[in-house]
Image (tube, rainbow, N blue to C red):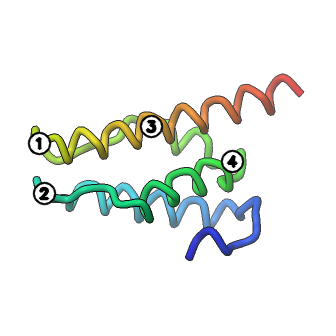
């Protein structure tokens, strides 16, 4: 669904999406796996967030204490997400 929203997003929409994602991650159980829809959502968010949301996106993310491979996949996706946001920030700063 978020893939259909025109970009760049407003700061309000970016903040709402980041808050919802952080809440979702904290509610994960030890068997939740990031499906293809989530993988697309991470990429969409990283590319659609306005620059005013970059700092909030790079605040360290909290995760449940689970040590399963599924949780490691979520952590990897967040790591990639924040790296994309950081790269966008660097590009914009250099322009």
Left or right of residue 57: residue 75: left
Q: Which residue is mark 2?
A: 31
Task: State the separation of the CA atoms marked 4 and 2.
Answer: 34 Å
Nearer to us in this view, 79 or 36: 36
Q: Which residue is mark 1?
A: 68
Left or right of residue 72: residue 54: right
Q: Secondary structure at mark 1?
A: loop
Which one is closest to the eye, mark 3 or mark 1? 1
* Place of residue 93 in the rendered image (x, y in percent of width and height, measured from the top left): 80, 27
Q: Residues within 10 Å of mark 1 (few under 14, many from 20)?
A: few
Q: Secondary structure at mark 4?
A: helix
* Disc with the residue nearer the chain's start (3 vs 4): 4
Which one is closest to the eye, mark 4 or mark 2? 2
Q: Residue at x 78, y 29 (%)?
A: 91
Left or right of residue 71: residue 78: right
Picture quadrant of residue 92: top right
Task: State the separation of the CA atoms marked 3 and 4.
Answer: 13 Å
* Place of residue 16 in the rendered image (x, y in percent of width and height, measured from the top left): 52, 66
Mark 1 and mark 2 residues within 8 Å of each other at the beta carbon: yes
Task: State the separation of the CA atoms marked 1 and 2.
Answer: 8 Å
* Place of residue 95 in the rendered image (x, y in percent of width and height, measured from the top left): 89, 28
Looking at the rendered structure, which numbered label has been put on residue 52?
4
Nearer to us in this view, 21 or 35: 35
Task: State the separation of the CA atoms marked 2 and 3.
Answer: 25 Å
Q: Secondary structure at mark 3?
A: loop
* Disc with the residue nearer the chain's start (3 vs 1): 3
Q: Which residue is mark 3?
A: 59
Mark 4 and mark 1 residues within 8 Å of each other at the beta carbon: no
Task: State the separation of the CA atoms marked 4 and 1.
Answer: 34 Å
């Amino acid at each position: 669904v978020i893939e259909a929203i025109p970009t760049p997003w407003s700061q309000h929409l970016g903040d709402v999406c980041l808050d919802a994602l952080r809440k979702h991650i904290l509610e994960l159980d030890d068997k939740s796996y990031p499906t293809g829809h989530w993988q697309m959502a991470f990429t969409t968010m990283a590319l659609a967030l306005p620059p005013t949301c970059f700092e909030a996106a790079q605040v360290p993310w909290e995760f449940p204490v689970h040590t399963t491979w599924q949780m490691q996949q979520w952590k990897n996706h967040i790591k990639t997400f924040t790296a994309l946001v950081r790269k966008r920030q660097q590009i914009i700063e250099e322009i």
